[in-house]
Image (cartoon, coloured by chain):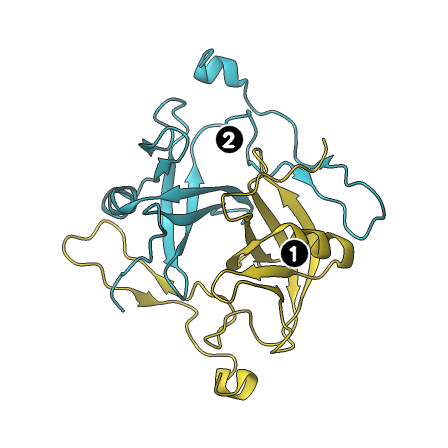
Chain colours: A yellow, B cyan
């Protein structure tokens, strides 16, 4: 019953963040040991950005922090699930509540075209992140 | 709006499966191109087992198949979320409904000890998988 994360070759575990109220998946990201430790110690979500190769406190730019209501670890400890209270209008850098704002139609012949679902923007990324 | 999965160096995307009714995360696994295509075509969950290096129809051994109610893709298309109807008593190979049956206590000093949450077994893995 000890926490013994099984980090991958890059030193990361996968983290799924769901909305504590709706249950919707907000985002999938990664944590290194330090991000995991900081999340556990502070009760706020910290990740490791694979593109920036840097520790990342969720909301550090946008203010859209995530308060962790509960953290769980899976059977082989290579993934964690956090139920969060998402501050601000959304979790996604595109300006939506969730990163999962498009559906993939199932059991259709031919090319797959995505469809928006909950795709309306809840904030303008330019206002929040500037022109970065 | 085309489906254009961003596979990682191993040719995989991350897949989060949630229970379509409760919203609980059942498991986190991976799909290669073929698993994704088969899931889309059949509406049943197919994964790629990293340990066995093989395509894997969820439930092929246990009968605990997953009917996909909805599939979504995230903003950068390196993760998919499927809402599923889980057949049988559970998704986890340890004999539980979900792979996430242990919590990680937050904001506690000292060593982290996991706690069971929804940890009761809903089936006996030996009955389902034999001695594999």
Q: CA distance from mark 1 to mark 2?
A: 30 Å
Label 2 sits on residue: B90
Q: Nearer the viewer, residue A66 or B118?
A: A66
Left or right of B43 on screen, residue A56? right
Label 1 sits on residue: A35
How many badges with numbers are in the image?
A: 2
Left or right of A91 on screen, residue B104? right
Residue at the spot 49% in from the left edge and 87% down from the top edge: A126
Hey, which residue is sitting farthest top in the picture?
B131
**Residue B1, quarter of the rendered image:** bottom left
Badge 1: chain ID: A
**Residue B111, quarter of the rendered image:** top right
Residue at the spot 19% in from the left edge and 53% down from the top edge: A108
Q: Secondary structure at mark 1?
A: helix
Left or right of B66 on screen, residue A76? right
Hey, which residue is sitting farthest left in the picture?
A110
Q: Nearer the viewer, residue A51 or A96?
A: A51
- Do residues under tags 1 and 2 come within 8 Å of each other at their CB atoms? no
Q: Residue A99, relative to residue A6: is it above or below?
A: below
Residue at the spot 45% in from the left edge and 75% down from the top edge: A94
Q: Secondary structure at mark 2?
A: loop
Left or right of B36 on screen, residue A68? right
């Amino acid at each position: 019953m000890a926490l013994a994360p099984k980090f991958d070759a890059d030193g990361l575990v996968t983290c799924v963040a769901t909305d504590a109220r709706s249950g919707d998946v907000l985002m999938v990201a990664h944590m290194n040991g330090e991000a995991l430790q900081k999340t556990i110690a502070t009760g706020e979500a910290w990740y490791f950005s694979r593109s920036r190769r840097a520790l990342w406190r969720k909301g550090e730019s946008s203010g859209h922090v995530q308060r962790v209501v509960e953290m769980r670890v899976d059977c082989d400890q290579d993934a964690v699930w956090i139920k969060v209270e998402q501050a601000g209008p959304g979790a996604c850098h595109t300006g939506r509540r969730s990163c999962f704002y498009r559906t993939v139609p199932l059991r259709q012949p031919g090319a797959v075209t995505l469809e928006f679902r909950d795709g309306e923007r809840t904030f303008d990324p330019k206002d929040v992140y500037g022109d970065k």
